[in-house]
Amino acid sequence: MAVAPIVRYMILCDDWEADADHEQRFTIHGLMTGIRSVDDPPYPLLYEELRILLLLTEGYEAGDAQIICVHEETDIRMFGSPKHRVVFSADPVAIVSVAFRIKDCRFPQSGLYSVQFWYDGQMVAECPLRLR
């Protein structure tokens, strides 16, 4: 098992753009901390696409990265991304960006969810996501 990298930033958002002139600069669109359903009835909710941008450092070995979304109250896994192989440069303090786009995210009810970053089978970071 590889040693997990350090998560400098884990950003849930509508989208992002990489700066063509500065490879480590991003413009974030629609920073996300929660989702409000406007459907009638509001749940279950099918959210078209959840996007997560990770900026990682101190990665010493390649490993498998994955995003998993868990309902906090029941501890049930709702959905996740496929595994993504992350390879780091020879410079361990370099920043590596990893992007996830998860389509057709199903939320069965309102409440608190945890969007988790897993690296080689170990949870490394999580962000809360409240659905109303």
Image (cartoon, grey):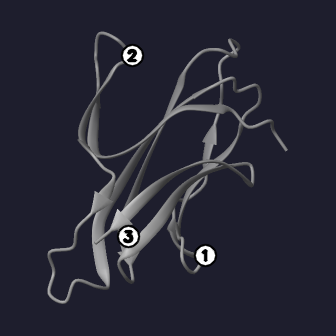
Contact, mark 3 vs mark 2 (Cβ under 8 Å): no
Measure the alpha-carbon separation of dots 3 and 2: 29 Å
Which residue is disc 3 drawn over?
A: 105
User: Mark 3 or mark 2: which comes first in sequence?
Assistant: 2
> In the rendered structure, which amino acid carries the disc numbered 2?
Glu
Measure the alpha-carbon separation of dots 2 and 1: 37 Å
Q: Would residue 49 appear left or right of 57 to someone viewing this image? A: left
- Along the viewing direction, whichever of 33 and 88 lies nearer the viewer: 33
SS at mark 3 in the image:
strand
Q: How many labels does the image show?
A: 3
User: Mark 1 or mark 3: which comes first in sequence?
Assistant: 1
Q: Position of residue 65 (x, y in %)?
A: 63, 47
Q: Position of residue 18 (x, y in %)?
A: 31, 25
Which residue does the image show at 38% across and 70% down from the upper left? Answer: 105
The image quadrant that residue 45 belongs to is: bottom left
> In the rendered structure, which amino acid carries the disc numbered 3?
Cys
The image quadrant that residue 29 belongs to is: top left
SS at mark 1 in the image:
loop
Label 1 Cα crowd, 10 Å radius (few <14 / some 14-19 / many 20+): few
Camera-side mark, 3 or 2? 3
Which residue is disc 1 drawn over?
A: 75
Query: Which disc is residue 23 wearing?
Result: 2
Label 2 Cα crowd, 10 Å radius (few <14 / some 14-19 / many 20+): few
SS at mark 2 in the image:
loop
The image quadrant that residue 47 belongs to is: bottom left
> In the rendered structure, which amino acid carries the disc numbered 1?
Asp
Q: Position of residue 95 (x, y in %)?
A: 55, 20
Q: Would residue 113 appear left or right of 94 to someone viewing this image? A: left
Which residue does the image show at 65% across and 18% down from the upper left? Answer: 89
Measure the alpha-carbon separation of dots 1 and 3: 17 Å
Camera-side mark, 1 or 3? 1
